[in-house]
Amino acid sequence: MGVTTRKNTKNKVSYPIATAKTIKKFLISETLAIVTSSFFLTSVTSVTSVTSVAELPSAIVLTLIIMMQYRRFGRTELSMPVFSCGGMRYQYKWQDVPANEIPPDNQQNLESTIRYSVECGINHIETARGYGTSEMQLGSIFPKFPREKLIVQTKISPKPNSQEFREEFDKSLAYLQLEYVDLLSLHGINTLELLEESMRPGGCMDVARKLQAEGKVRFIGFSTHGPTDVIVKTIETNQFDYLNLHWYYINQSNWSAIEAAKRHDMGVFIISPSDKGGQLYSPPQKLVDLCYPLSPMVFNDLFCLSHPQVHTLSLGAAKPEDFNEHLKAVELLDIADEILPPILARLEDAAINKLGEDWFKTWHVGLPTIENTPGGINIYVILWLWNLAQAYDTIDYCKMRYNLLGNAGHWFPGQKADRLDELDLRRPLAHSPHAAKIPGILQAADRLFGGEAIQRLSQE
């Protein structure tokens, strides 16, 4: 639930209602037009009893493999699949370990996941130096593919010492067993200080340009968990070919950054739409009901990809079958304008009914920054999580995010609201139309979400 509300993606005055029957009919007709083997035709007949996209049999999913869609990835001119294979869920450890310590079954699962990804047409494999054994393990399978068939991205965090950045990249390339990567991202430009440090003469960007000149990097981008103003400033340097950022249905606050990326013809990669987008692999029943006849995961995929400014969504697969639910969205992209509007309307109405229309539309107005809030409380994020929990019952997700506050540094900044009795928020909330009620909501949120501190995965 971001600031943005219901969207009409093609400026139509009225929306057709897409029922489960409509979706089923479309998928059957498209599948029968493509699949000719008797095995698949026999399997497809079972679709007649389907009432939800989430119930589609594996035969439908398998036919979608040959229907992967691709988008021009900005000025890189790469043909990017609408889904990318993220590399932070299938690796053995979040720390480097010797190759002989990696269990064979873990390596076999990783290689099966990559093979299935490529078979599905998802040939963009994304990893990072900070993902522990991910690069080393990928390096065991990459040489088994024609290099030109893969798009490989790795990410290196900016360093005060740019020579250390170079050394980290060299280690990545050696682990990956590649002569070059297609995409190199400066990983985690989350603050203005990190931006300035990266762009200074002799800084990490200069090193990345040297790597590009040496033929070891094709295109340079950045990844970010930072605030929108920092993202836009980074885009406006016009030094980057693409960016990785967060944006999905429940958090649309970075839309202006996506628009800025479009103006600069940059590729746009969405980070973690299923996990950070609401833990959609285990959604609450209320969200399941509101997204019907789609699963929440397929709905969110379609919502993101219905915007042509978005080029690819990262899927953090832990095993091969984790792709299948997402693949259902590919075949529905052409009728997204029929399917999405009634679901969007239900989601918005559910939020308004629970929160009240005035709060729903104005809760974010006049909130102070973290730096201008006593105790460094991240008021915006806490209220956002409160709204999600109240509207859609996303309690587990909100607890996870809330308890990261104070433990994730600039990746998820700010503090929890567990010390309100010691703080006076009257001055920082002076410009909010809800100044009188916000302290009470912050206290209620702390009671609902508070618990044991949680660390980022890379810290575990």
Image (cartoon, rainbow, N blue to C red):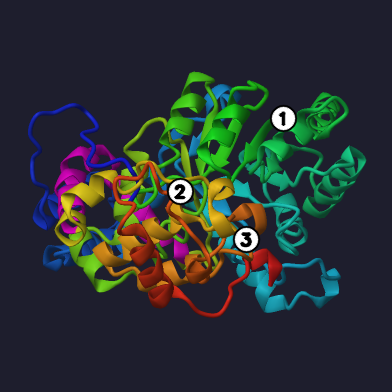
Which residue carries the number 1 mark?
218
Residue appearing at x 76%, y 29% in the figure: 199
Mark 2 surroundings within 10 Å by alpha-carbon count, few (fewer than 14), some (14 through 19), many (20 or more): few
Q: In the visual, does 241 lie left or right of 397?
A: right
**Split into 4 quadrants, where in the image is the C terminus?**
bottom right
Q: Measuring from the top left, give residue 336's x and y in whole percent.
A: 24, 41
Q: Measuring from the top left, give residue 249's x and y in whole percent.
A: 34, 49
Point out the tag, 2 or 1, that comes first from the N-terminus.
1
Q: Which residues are magenta?
A: 322-350
Q: Measuring from the top left, give residue 60's x and y in whole percent.
A: 29, 58
Quarter location, residue 241: top right
Question: What amino acid type should be assigned to the residue bearing mark 1?
Answer: Arg
Image position of 441 with respect to 37: above or below: below
Question: Mark 2 or mark 1, which is nearer to you?
Answer: 2
Residue appearing at x 45%, y 59% in the figure: 323
User: Considering the numbered disc 2 on the image, is that residue within a helix, a strand or a loop?
Assistant: loop
Which residue carries the number 2 mark?
427
Q: Which mark is residue 88?
A: 3
Labels 2 and 3 touching (C-beta < 8 A)? no
User: Considering the numbered disc 3 on the image, is that residue within a helix, a strand or a loop?
Assistant: loop
Q: Rounded to the nearest whole Å, what is the CA distance between mark 3 and mark 1?
A: 22 Å
Question: What amino acid type should be assigned to the residue bearing mark 3?
Answer: Met
Q: Which mark is residue 431?
A: none
Residue appearing at x 44%, y 41% in the figure: 82
Q: Nearer the viewer, residue 386 or 183?
A: 386
Question: What amino acid type should be assigned to the residue bearing mark 2?
Answer: Arg
Quarter location, residue 362: top left
Q: Rounded to the nearest whole Å, what is the CA distance between mark 2 and mark 1?
A: 50 Å
Q: Rounded to the nearest whole Å, what is the CA distance between mark 2 and mark 3?
A: 42 Å
Mark 1 surroundings within 10 Å by alpha-carbon count, few (fewer than 14), some (14 through 19), many (20 or more): some
Secondary structure mostly seen in the magenta stretch: helix
